Image (cartoon, rainbow, N blue to C red):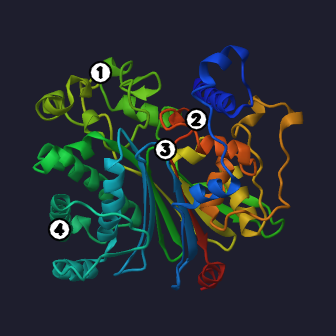
Amino acid sequence: MASIINVVNRRRKIAKIRSLICGLIWPRYLKNVVTPSFNTPKMTSEEITNKLRSEEFSLKMGMKCAIKAYDTNQLAANSPMEDARAEASSTFTNDIFFGVFDGHGGRSCAQVLAKRLLKYISATLLPNEELRKYATAMHDENVQLLRTFNDRYGFLQDLKTLYDQKFKEYVNNLMDQSDLQNLSVRRAMEIAFEHMDNDISEEAADDKTSGQRCLMVGMTGSVACVVHVNGLHLHVASVGDCQAILGGQTKSSGEWYTKQLTNEHNCENLEEVERIIASHPRNERHTVIKNGRLLGTLIPLRAFGDVRYKWTKEQLEKLAVPVFGGSVIPPDLYTPPYLTASPDVTYHKLTESDKFVVIATDGLWDVLSPQQVVQLVGDHMDGRSSALWYKLHKIKELFQTPTTIAKPRTEAVPVDKNSATHLIRASLGGSDDDRVGRLLSFPQEHVRLIRDDITVTVIFFDNDFVKANNEK
């Protein structure tokens, strides 16, 4: 019950701040204080649309598989943006991957994961024969393990050289150890996540790059959610508070249903809190989790990077304090590691009723519930816009009387063809251009008061492929 109360209080606070800024509530005592700072310029509908669409991407797969197409988009709040994303297919197998990554403390760790993690997973999933074939040819730059779809940046040369070498070592390690071959998808994803995080830590501890970039990657952190599809088999591996949901439609009534594919790793998850407390001595039970955070400072309870929660105090004093100062050592750091990147992995076999999966960073889920997201995408597929004019939050009943809750507007045609853009627009206010414009034009130095970075990928299933393969 206490956890639920904390969630409600946190969301009430977020909603009230957004209400204040958007003019829904404007107490008299605030007018003289905040009006000058929050006087945002009015954006036209065209300006709003151009900004929302600037990072969108869509692709029809054009191959025989369970995935017909996907839409993805991002909207920054931080400058620079701390979210990242990746989509790719294996050139050796039928594996297809989608990932979203939400960085904290900076963007370095999330960007590195977007470029590296899918390769680690793909290599771990290779059958033994294909693994050896790839290892023999990987020195050839023309031989690529993955075909990426939306890769917009690369590494500096010293990082690329280091990362390529570390990946070769990982592939050789896979071949040398028989217990790492021909694994289940679940175990392969667990090993790839854990080894990726271990490499980030090792690289940070032995950083020889100019500007100590590897140490910076390790000191920042990121949560992650990766979707893997092969045939009718869907696996989702998650660390932290990104979420994945499946949207489907019942045959009998045509109603949309939602299936949660991830669990959030934060203090709202009682099992996760109990796991961490049980992993440390009893005399730390009051210090491991404080004020809803790990060691009183970190919100996600699983994450990549964040070596300050994984290294010993002696390691931090030797490697991090000279660069970042003594504040990098968290309070009550007695028995590290306190943080892991070992993922929860869920499995779902696709059926004809399953229509799409949505993966997104918490910037979306802070505002829209899974049920609302599924309804929005489902109506969008049918050519209808159910942007409900969400004025406050997914628990809007706490803040609005029934007479002020706007009714769904499903008669309109969607403004955006890209369903990820449609979701982002809905999270900002949907059809209410005035509200959306205010949220988009808010001053950069204050924008994190009202919204977070948002990354959304919507993966649509090929119903004909799913039906045919279920009948076999």
319 relative to 208, above or below: above
Q: Residues within 10 Å of mark 3 (few under 14, many from 20)?
A: many
* Measured Cα–Cα span from mark 2 to mark 4: 43 Å
Q: Secondary structure at mark 3?
A: loop
* Measured Cα–Cα span from mark 4 to mark 3: 31 Å
Task: Assign the C terminus to one quadrant of the image.
Answer: bottom right
Q: Which residue is mark 3?
A: 241
Q: Position of residue 295 (x, y in %)?
A: 35, 25
Is residue 289 visible to us here?
Answer: yes
Please tell me which of labels 4 and 3 falls first in the chain: 4
> Which numbered circle lies on residue 450?
2
Q: Secondary structure at mark 1?
A: loop
Q: Nearer the viewer, mark 2 or mark 4?
A: 2
> Which numbered circle lies on residue 331?
1
Which three-letter amino acid code belongs to the residue tagged 4? Answer: Lys
389 relative to 330, above or below: below
Please tell me which of labels 3 and 1 falls first in the chain: 3
Q: Secondary structure at mark 2?
A: loop
The residue furthest top is 29
Of residue 231 and residue 149, the one placed in the foreground of this image is 149
Please tell me which of labels 2 and 4 falls first in the chain: 4
Mark 4 near mark 3, Cβ–Cβ under 8 Å? no
Is residue 369 visible to us here?
Answer: no
Task: Assign the N terminus to one quadrant of the image.
Answer: top right
Of residue 339 and residue 471, the one placed in the foreground of this image is 339
* Measured Cα–Cα span from mark 3 to mark 2: 18 Å
